[in-house]
Image (cartoon, grey):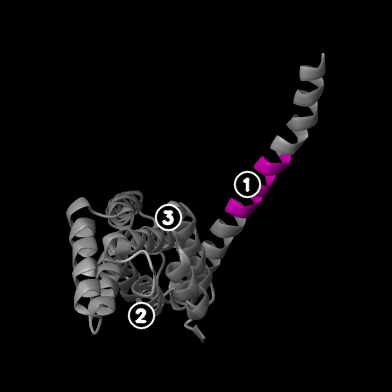
Amino acid sequence: MIKHGIDQDALITQFSEATAKQGEALRKAVTEATLKALQGRELTLAHIKQVLQTVAKAASTGAANNPLGAVDTEALLGKAVAGMDGALEKAVQANRRALQQMLDQGASLRETQLKKALADTEKMEDALFSSLRKAAEGADTQLERSWGEVLKAAQSKGTFTGAQATASVEQLMDGARQNLRDGRALGLRASQAMLDSYATLVSGVLIGMSDALQRGAASATEAVAAKAPAAARSRKK
């Protein structure tokens, strides 16, 4: 079943069949599925919450059906959280880049839409934690306990999403203050079109970031493949 851009059945199957040695593959699968879902819609906080809750619920259902048993449930759920955190970190970066583009064009963080965008960036880590709590609701006692431990660990150590959000907000605020010092600012009417399309702009930035990563990975693979024959000839000599 597809919900909010997530193939829940595929994720449930991955978690229900994962072995202890497949943790990293599971994390990557969650990151990719979450990113794909986020790219398919406007990157608003409401949509982000929907995607995270859907992913967390699928992970919860799959982990509950995994024959590894309760001993490894926390490890499986921990990989789900790491995967969502990785995708959400990219969403924070996309927000920062989009906001920076608008600041560079003279927009002000005092504008209502940008003030909200900045506040939503700071709330993304809380959105992740909230999705974990909701996944625990209605779960059996053991699974609820496992989610509790995973959530406690994430809150204690912090997330990449939270660290990225803090750094992004500080950087953007510094940029906004610099704009004021330089006297660069657009009137509300002049910048309204950009402001109204902010969520769409962020989605485009996120897609661009992902495409760049894929191109980079493909180039790296091609470079390795190109070096392989040369290395083989060198060994023969």
Nearest to the observer: residue 54 or residue 110 = 54
Q: Residues within 10 Å of mark 1 (few under 14, many from 20)?
A: few
Query: Please, is residue 213 above or below residue 140 in the view?
Result: above
Prevalent SS, magenta region? helix
Tell me the CA gap for discs 1 and 2.
31 Å
Mark 1 or mark 2: name the one nearer the start of the chain.
2
| Residue drawn at x 31%, y 54% as measured from the top left | 180
Say whether residue 146 is left or right of residue 98.
left
Residue furthest to the top: 237
Residue at the spot of label 3? 23
Numbered range of the magenta stretch: 213-222
- Residue type at mark 3? Gly
Residue at the spot of label 2? 46
| Residue drawn at x 34%, y 62% as measured from the top left | 81
- Residue type at mark 1? Gly
- Residue type at mark 2? Ala
Which quarter shows the C terminus?
top right
**Mark carried by residue 216:** 1
Label 2 sits on a secondary structure element that is: helix
Report whether residue 27 is seen. Answer: yes
Tell me the CA gap for discs 2 and 3.
29 Å
